[in-house]
Amino acid sequence: MNALQRLAVSLEMPGGPRVARRQREGWPASTREDVGFYQGARAQIRYRERGQGRPIVFVADPPVTLELYDELLELYAGHFRVVVFELPGMGFSTPGAGYDLRFQPANDGVAEFLQAVVGEPAVLAFSCVAGFIAVDLANRYPQLVSHLVLIQTPSWSEAVRWKHSRDPKGVLGRPFIGQLVMNRMKRSRAPLWFQLALGGRGGHYEPFCDCAQDSIRRGAGWALASAFQHYLTDQSPPLPLVRQPLLALWGLRDQSHAPTDKSSTERLAQRAESEHYPDLGHFPELEDPPRVLARIRRFLGDDAGP
């Protein structure tokens, strides 16, 4: 990334030591007893952790923040050591000075976090665009990844189609303008996004929307424009087929992915299986944690346990 690109990104992803300290000492550090911060070379990452045993790692899919993961953490902690974190520039994770949002450099920051905090091969249960982080790490850092669970993640080309459907006029794809527009509209965009992603104003809408609106009001990041410009680019990065087993989960009520070829996820790995939920939307792991937990345990072959 050149200097102008970094400047544009900084409008949407403010970072550096002062911002990081404010997050560690302020409201984001006090919302739950299990909130922690990892200070890495590239970013400060906010996360929550519960339980013991085989590690499973989730990424909060913005504008969702860690505060919405209470039920999931409670359930999974009976079977796993479960970690959920926010990506830099999303929620209350803070980019470091000179943070590079391009594909492999950004993914390297996640690898650093996994190595330091998890420290052993983990099940990566990553959502939407973040699913490509899991695919890349499974190839370049296989010692960190035992299995992949990709949630609402299609092939790269299908994800690019999704990106353009979310930004049909290309406003978010324009440096500086996209960042300024997203900063101004993220509070109004969040309710519309949840209505689309959850398939209407059903029982899950208000908890998702209320949590996101409160977090955004308190300064949570949702760096969608910067991610569209520098991470989910029209040209695909190298994505060899992963050797680790892959489970693809799709909530079919997610109207944002209605045209997406769900079968394309299985083409990201040598061994893959899938599960579709007609009654769930973009966040199946949060909309019905017990059902998704049971499916993941079957995938891992440990559903006979306690």
Image: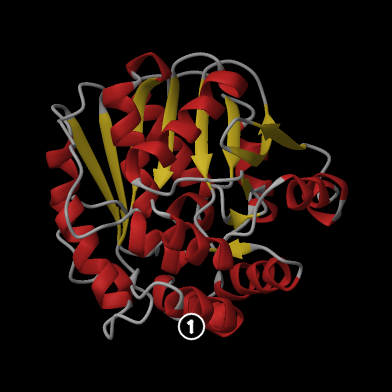
- Residue nearer the viewer, 62 or 100: 100
Q: Is 124 left, or right, of 50 in this rendering? A: left
**What's the residue at 34%, 25% (across, down)?**
147
Tell me, what colour scheme is on the image? secondary structure
**What's the residue at 55%, 15% (across, down)?**
119
- Badge 1 element: helix
**Residue 255 appears in view:** yes
Q: Is 150 left, or right, of 98 in this rendering? A: left
Query: Callout 1 environment at 10 Å: few (<14), some (14 to 19), or many (20+)?
Result: some
Q: Is 215 left, or right, of 98 in this rendering? A: right
Q: Is 203 left, or right, of 138 in this rendering? A: right
State the image coordinates of residue 174 (x, y, percent, origin top left): 35, 75
Q: Residue furthest front?
A: 3
**What's the residue at 60%, 44% (across, down)?**
72
State the image coordinates of residue 196 (x, y, percent, origin top left): 40, 78
- Residue nearer the viewer, 165 or 286: 165
Q: Which residue is mark 1?
A: 192
**Number of numbered callouts drawn:** 1
**Residue 199 appears in view:** no
Q: Quick check: 120 above or below 33?
A: above
Query: Image quarter for residue 121?
Result: top left
State the image coordinates of residue 274 (x, y, percent, origin top left): 23, 42
State the image coordinates of residue 267 (x, y, percent, origin top left): 12, 40
* Amino acid type, mark 1: Leu
Query: Image quarter for residue 306?
Result: top right
Q: Quick check: 146 above or below 234?
A: above
Q: Quick check: 262 above or below 17?
A: below
